[in-house]
């Protein structure tokens, strides 16, 4: 779970204001005839859909930004929100049974797996893209960007010779190596989707920044051995979600329209508010990106979950597929699962894999 995402703020996030539509007032009903005309549910949905929210694509782009934190991703944020509802036993808005709602929440909190292996890997320190956990809420484009931007901490001297680098490394992973780990080496996660490497547990960012700056200034490589953790999509969960649910991320006004027709036609569904992420300071990112985030910080989009067992679900999905303010999250998860290939057996024999420098 991304540490920047506060569960209370997620559950109490404000709706964004609407403008220039017949149903502009918060909670106002749609201004449409109370009696449906002939036609399928897709046609009825088309009659109440609002103009496209042109800011939606930008907000979705923000949620896909790569940062120095491993869990910062669209599926990672949705995991965080679903887990917040489970943690506080809050009930998202729904037009389906509590059992079905709990089932989809359970699956949305388990989109990824991490398996600690008995394999070792040798890496250069510069091959680490970021960390699974980060002690502050600030977000940077990468770990290397963090090291370039952050000011050296008072009292922390940078290495002036190669002999000082191991000491900085030990301080960087202070508290990272578990006393119960008989191998006594740090753990590094490898993402199966792109082969990137991440610190798997707690690190000391200022010490790590000093280490990386020292390597850069001395023009030397610093290699270390780590225990390999496999991080990959939970294929069983994604497969089950694809079979049982259609998941659509959309603007609030689209959610309102879908809610209206689903209530009228008794289509089972539920939805979760998805705030804009990242939510904290963003040093190193393009100023226009940060400005857009600031302008949209209070805007909620929504993840609509439609039960595939209902015959009208496919028609709704097709009707919404071409909208600029709707994103097919089910297809996105399927593509993510397709990238998860050749996941090794985490219980394989102890081995040492040495990777070349990048």
Image (cartoon, rainbow, N blue to C red):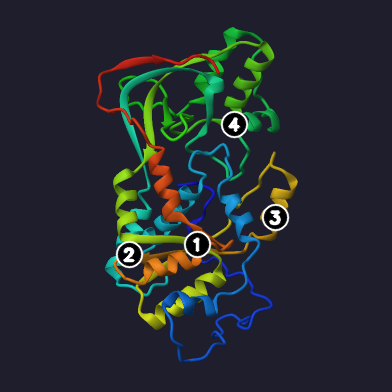
Numbered label attached to residue 143: 4
Label 3: which residue?
Answer: 292
Earlier in the chain: of badge 2 and badge 4, it is 4
Report how many numbered discs are placed on residues in the image. 4
Residue 308 is tagged as 2
Between the residue at mark 2 and the residue at mark 4, the CA separation in whole angstroms equals 41 Å
Between 121 and 165, which is closer to the camera in this rendering? 121
For disc 3, the neighbor class at 10 Å (few under 14, some 14 to 19, many from 20) is some
Image marks 2 and 3: residues in contact by CB distance under 8 Å? no
* Nearer to me, 87 or 91: 91
Q: How far is mark 1 from mark 3, CA to CA?
A: 25 Å
> Mark 4, residues whose alpha carbon is within 10 Å: few (<14), some, or many (≥20)?
many
Cα separation, mark 2 vs mark 1, equals 16 Å
Q: Is 314 located above or below residue 25 in the figure?
A: above
In which image quadrant can residue 308 be found?
Answer: bottom left
Q: Earlier in the sequence, mark 4 or mark 1?
A: 4
Residue 276 x/y as whole percent: 58, 57
Camera-nearest label, 2 or 1:
1
Q: Within 10 Å of the Cα at label 1, are there few (<14), some (14-19), or many (20+) other Cα atoms?
A: some
Compute the Cα span from label 4 to label 1. 36 Å
The CA span between labels 2 and 3 is: 35 Å
Q: Is residue 95 visible?
A: yes
Name the residue that disc number 1 marks: 321
């Amino acid at each position: 779970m991304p540490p920047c995402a506060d569960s209370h703020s997620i559950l109490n996030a404000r709706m964004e204001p609407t403008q220039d539509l017949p149903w502009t007032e918060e909670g106002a009903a749609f201004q449409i005839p109370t009696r449906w005309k002939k036609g399928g549910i897709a046609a009825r949905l088309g009659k109440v859909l609002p103009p496209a929210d042109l800011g939606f694509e930008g907000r979705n782009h923000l949620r896909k930004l790569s940062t120095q934190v491993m869990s910062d991703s669209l599926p990672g944020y949705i995991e965080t929100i679903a887990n917040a509802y489970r943690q506080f036993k809050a009930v998202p808005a729904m037009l389906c049974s509590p059992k079905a709602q709990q089932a989809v929440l359970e699956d949305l909190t388990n989109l990824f797996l991490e398996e600690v292996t008995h394999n070792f890997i040798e890496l250069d320190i510069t091959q680490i893209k970021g960390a699974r956990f980060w002690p502050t809420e600030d977000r940077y484009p990468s770990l290397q960007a963090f090291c370039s931007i952050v000011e050296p901490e008072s009292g922390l001297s940078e290495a002036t010779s190669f002999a000082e680098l191991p000491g900085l490394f030990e301080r960087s992973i202070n508290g990272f190596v578990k006393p119960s780990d008989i191998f006594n080496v740090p753990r590094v996660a490898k993402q199966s989707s792109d082969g990137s490497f991440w610190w798997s547990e707690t690190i000391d960012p200022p010490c790590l920044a000093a280490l990386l700056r020292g390597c850069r200034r001395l023009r030397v490589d610093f290699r270390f051995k780590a225990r390999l953790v496999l991080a990959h999509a939970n294929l069983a969960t994604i497969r089950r979600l694809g079979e049982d649910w259609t998941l659509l991320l959309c603007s609030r006004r689209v959610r309102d329209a879908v809610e209206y027709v689903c209530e009228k036609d008794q289509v089972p569904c539920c939805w979760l508010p998805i705030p804009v992420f990242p939510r904290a300071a963003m040093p190193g990112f393009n100023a226009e990106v940060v400005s857009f985030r600031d302008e949209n910080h209070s805007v909620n989009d929504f993840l609509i979950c439609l039960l595939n067992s209902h015959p009208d679900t496919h028609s709704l999905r097709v009707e919404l597929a071409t909208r600029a303010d709707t994103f097919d999250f089910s297809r996105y998860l399927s593509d993510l699962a397709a990238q998860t290939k050749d996941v090794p057996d985490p219980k394989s024999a102890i081995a040492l894999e040495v990777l070349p420098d990048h």
